[in-house]
């Protein structure tokens, strides 16, 4: 493990035990902590700007920015290459928590590397809080399904066509495996059995995990994976499964 403290979630800090885990990682109350929110993963979608603004205002269902942080700032990764590292790095180092929101994990992991943030994350004292795509992109290798091919601005990837059953029948999707930021040596599949994510069934999660060369945690929206100094704990008031690598 490279990063000392991570909290990888499916839907943010959604219950008391996940909140307690976050406070434990911070080492102080949330109200005394400074956070930077990273909305980058949502930007490839047509509604991305509106959703990002809602996240910042605390209007989204995800419990992330509305936790009562002592201070809250915005860190947009696509802007960092055009800004001197001497400008943005001190702000990042001063943050107690970096909040990586959901969206497209392939796009997020690309910009984590392209921006230079992935290189400095191992040296930070900040808690990495990943939600959905933010949790997935922390891995050395992750997998995601898409309804159309994705190149992520040239990010190397491999893919294969797989049909996954949904309540409305079968939908042809492309399963993509890609290199993440390399902060943990396991993968995360979020939104397990969430009705708003009908393809994230336990059966499909098992199929996806079988395509990955690392252990894979499939977690529902009431579960988080906590990493402290290389020790991995599952914090849950819901359902989760660990699939070994194949």
Image (cartoon, helix red, strand yellow):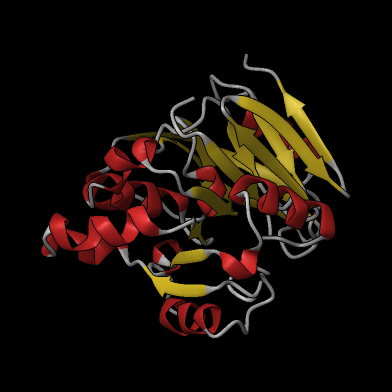
**Residue displayed at 47% across by 74% down:** 72
Quadrant of the rendered image containing residue 15: bottom right
Q: Is residue 118 above or below residue 67?
A: above
Q: Going by the picture, which residue comes out furthest to the top?
A: 246
Q: Is residue 64 visible?
A: no
Q: Is residue 167 above or below residue 70?
A: above
**Residue displayed at 60% across by 51% down:** 26
Task: Determine whether, in the image, residue 200 is placed left or right of residue 60.
Answer: right
**Residue displayed at 54% across by 44% down:** 136
Nearer to us in this view, 203 or 85: 85
**Residue displayed at 60% across by 81% down:** 58
Nearer to us in this view, 203 or 119: 119
> Residue 180 at x, y = what percent?
41, 37
Q: Is residue 37 visible?
A: yes
Task: Determine whether, in the image, residue 81 is placed left or right of residue 26.
Answer: left
Quadrant of the rendered image containing residue 32: bottom right
> Residue 99 at x, y = what percent?
51, 60
């Amino acid at each position: 493990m490279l990063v000392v403290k991570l909290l990888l979630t499916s839907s943010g800090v959604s219950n008391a035990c996940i909140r307690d885990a976050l406070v434990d990682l911070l080492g102080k109350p949330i109200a005394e902590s400074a956070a930077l929110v990273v909305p980058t993963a949502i930007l490839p979608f047509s509604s991305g700007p509106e959703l990002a603004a809602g996240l910042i205002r605390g209007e989204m269902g995800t419990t992330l920015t509305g936790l009562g942080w002592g201070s809250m700032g915005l860190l947009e990764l696509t802007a960092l290459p055009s800004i001197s590292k001497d400008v943005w790095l001190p702000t990042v180092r001063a943050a107690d928590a970096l909040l990586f929101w959901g969206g497209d994990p392939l796009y997020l992991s690309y910009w984590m590397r392209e921006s230079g943030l992935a290189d400095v994350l191992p040296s930070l004292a900040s808690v990495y809080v990943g939600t959905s795509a933010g949790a997935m992109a922390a891995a050395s290798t992750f997998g995601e399904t898409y309804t159309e091919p994705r190149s992520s601005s040239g990010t190397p990837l491999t893919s294969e066509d797989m049909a996954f059953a949904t309540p409305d029948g079968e939908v042809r999707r492309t399963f993509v495996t890609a290199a993440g930021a390399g902060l943990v040596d396991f993968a995360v599949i979020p939104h397990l059995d969430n009705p708003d994510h009908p393809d994230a069934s336990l059966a499909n999660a098992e199929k996806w995990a079988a395509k990955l060369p690392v252990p894979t945690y499939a977690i529902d929206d009431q579960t988080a994976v906590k990493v402290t100094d290389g020790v991995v704990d599952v914090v849950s008031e819901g359902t989760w499964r660990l699939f070994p690598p194949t």
